[in-house]
Image: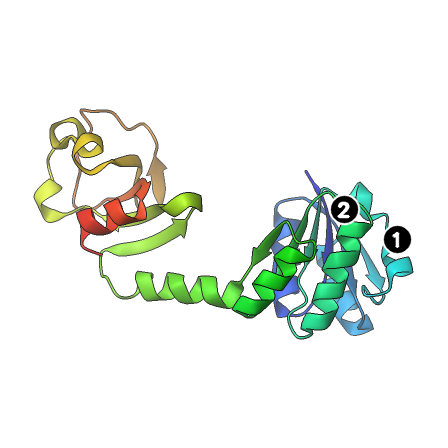
Amino acid sequence: MKSVLLIGLGRFGRHIARKLNEMNHQVMAVDRQEKRVEAALPFVTNGQIGDATNEEFLRSLGVRNYDVCIVAIGDDFQSSLETTSFLKELGAKKVVSRAARDVHEKFLLRNGADEVVYPEKQLAKWTAIRYTADHIFDYIELDDGYAIFELSVPQNWVGKSIGNLDIRKRYNINIMALKKDGKLNLNILPETELQSDETMLVLGEMKSIHKCFHI
């Protein structure tokens, strides 16, 4: 369980609050608008109405005590930037801020953000890859050009074992799990045979996965 300071309770912030609640994290939610704070109260540990660009208000929240501070402000970049900067100056352990444009991302990283999330850009990339190939079911892009893809089993791999295909050596790709009827099988062995009614979770460099599966 982690303690999270969540600043900004628009649609994006509310989605974060709901998910953190599902994961049983302790959340202090902050927004200028009373109605937004009230709407989030069922999903957070505590809520505060206040202006996060006010340094004294932020100080009163004890930002040093949170494992992570999330700035989810999306409709006012100036406020997002000021809040991010103040959080870092006040000793926040980790600051994650939302960007809405490329230039926002650069400024946030220069002014205190340890990491930046860019929902529109990230979702756009996911949508473009996911829905332009019938054999892709999901994907997560990792650092340094690596990714995890959920893919259907190629027809010419069906009925063959992972060992015989020698996927790791030939393609520099690891099959992490197989998925069937919504259930994951993590017990992947060289003798494991691939079936047409399964999907594969594969890990590797983006360029290797693109080449192997013709993405």
Dividing the image into 4 quarters, which one contains the C terminus?
bottom left
Taking the image as shown, residue 143 lies to the left or right of residue 186, namely right
Label 2 sits on a secondary structure element that is loop
Residue type at mark 1 is Arg
Residue 190 seen anywhere in this rendered image of the structure: yes
| 125 over 89 or under it: above or below | below
Measured from the top left, where is residue 32 in percent x and y? Answer: 81, 70
Residue at the front extreme, as displayed: 110
> What residue do we see at 69% from left, 40% from top?
2
Residue 140: x and y, percent? 40, 50
Q: Quadrant of residue 194?
A: top left
**Farthest residue in the left direction?**
156
Q: Nearer the N terminus, badge 2 or badge 1?
A: 1
Residue neighbourhood size for the residue with mark 2, other residues' Cα within 10 Å, grouped as few (<14), some (14–19), many (≥20) = many
Numbered disc 1: secondary structure: helix
Q: Please give left or right for residue 104 compared with residue 50 in the image.
A: left
Label disc, if present, on residue 59 of the rendered structure: 1
Give me the residue at 76% from left, 61% from top: 83
Instruction: Using the image, tell me which numbered label, if any, was put on residue 92.
Output: 2
Residue drawn where x is 28% and y is 35% of the image: 174
User: From where the camera sits, is residue 8 visible?
Assistant: no
Query: Which image quarter holds the N terminus?
Result: top right
Q: Is residue 81 above or below residue 206?
A: below
